[in-house]
Image: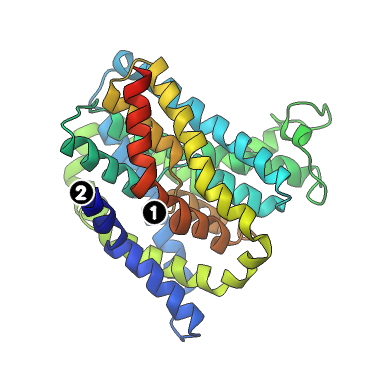
Amino acid sequence: MNEIVLQNLLSPVVLFFILGILAALCKSDLKFPSGLSEGLSIYLLIAIGIKGGVELSHYSIESVIGPITGTLFLGSIIPFITLFIMKCLKIDLYNSIGIAATYGSISIVTYGAALSFLDKNGTSYEGFMNALVVLMESPAIIISLLLLKVLENKKELASYSFQNFGFVSPSVKFLDNKVWRETIFGKSILLLLGSLIIGLVLGERSVPMVKPLFFDLYDSILILFLLNMGLVAGQRLPEVKKYGMKLLLFGLLTPLLFGGLGVIVGNLVGLSIGGTALMGVLAGSASYIAAPAALKTSVPKANPSIYLGLSLGVTFPFNLIVGIPVYYEFATWIQ
């Protein structure tokens, strides 16, 4: 287990993120051109979507309908729970949306560490879990951005309440056509879902054309993206101090809450022990790739130091050290 922890904490993507933070704190003149920054986000969204679509094309819909339903449920419900917690913690709306999208989405690196953990324990898991990884990236981002559009359209940013999320207030038109259009056809969601559908339709036929750019270069481009996000996070790091211990506790405790919910859902949809544990990992992890790529352009008022600092600086190492073994033990016990 210590080897897995060190391998991931000392991975290039994490170290370059830290380098970006250090560069910002030291007031280095290092900076990314705005066009390049935008291009990196577009690349990652396309790569994540198309890889998931290709993987999903290998399975019949009958064999994955249950796990897909469970995945969509988790990706949809976690943002609502997170927003409720943020309201209790009195976090402003834009940062609440950023955290909801981040924690509703998933960490691919944490998932990779979980696969290594299961392999070392000789625990098998369903092959289509790799497709669910990408499938779970989208719902939380879509729902979080949709909720933001609802509140912005109603001009309730200053004093939002849980009833404004569409459960109680009849004045909020959750299915307003303008809200749906601005959210679904915003470039972040359009690229993520569109690429997934293209990969699903074309399957392996698309691999020879897309592999050199979107498969082979993915890890290298990811390094550049996280270096840039480290710069952005480092520049706004002082803003995190005003939230203090309450967000730190959120980053440590909610992975167990969401991960436990993921294990329960995995068991209900009939996954094996390994698959159930992975469902817990997906639910308990927080994104520092897809969600930040979408938030950077769609919710620029959200502070990357907060949602990236929590996901990468708190929840990510917590899951590597504590979360993965806990989700596995819970999956073993519940079955």
Q: Quadrant of residue 115?
A: top left
**Residue 38: percent from left, percent from top:** 46, 63
Q: Residues within 10 Å of mark 1 (few under 14, many from 20)?
A: some
Q: Where is mark 1, residue-wise?
A: 317
Compare residues 224 and 334 and report the one nearer the observer: 334
Q: Which residue is disc 2 drawn over?
A: 211
Name which residue lies at 37% across and 53% down. Answer: 44
Q: Quadrant of residue 122?
A: top left
Q: Do residues under tags 1 and 2 come within 8 Å of each other at their CB atoms?
A: no
Distance CA(mark 1)–CA(mark 2)? 30 Å
Say which of 49 and 127 sits in front.
127
Q: Amino acid at mark 1?
A: Pro
Q: Element under label 1?
A: helix
Residue at 50 percent across and 85 percent down: it is 27
Q: Nearer the viewer, mark 1 or mark 2?
A: 1
Image quadrant of residue 301? bottom right
Task: Name the residue nearer the viewer: 290 or 90.
Answer: 90
Q: Is residue 335 visible?
A: yes
Q: Give the SS element for disc 2.
A: helix
Residue 253 screen position, x and y as percent: 53, 43
Which residue is located at x 64 percent, y 61 percent? 244
Left or right position of 178 against 44: right
Q: Is residue 298 visible?
A: no
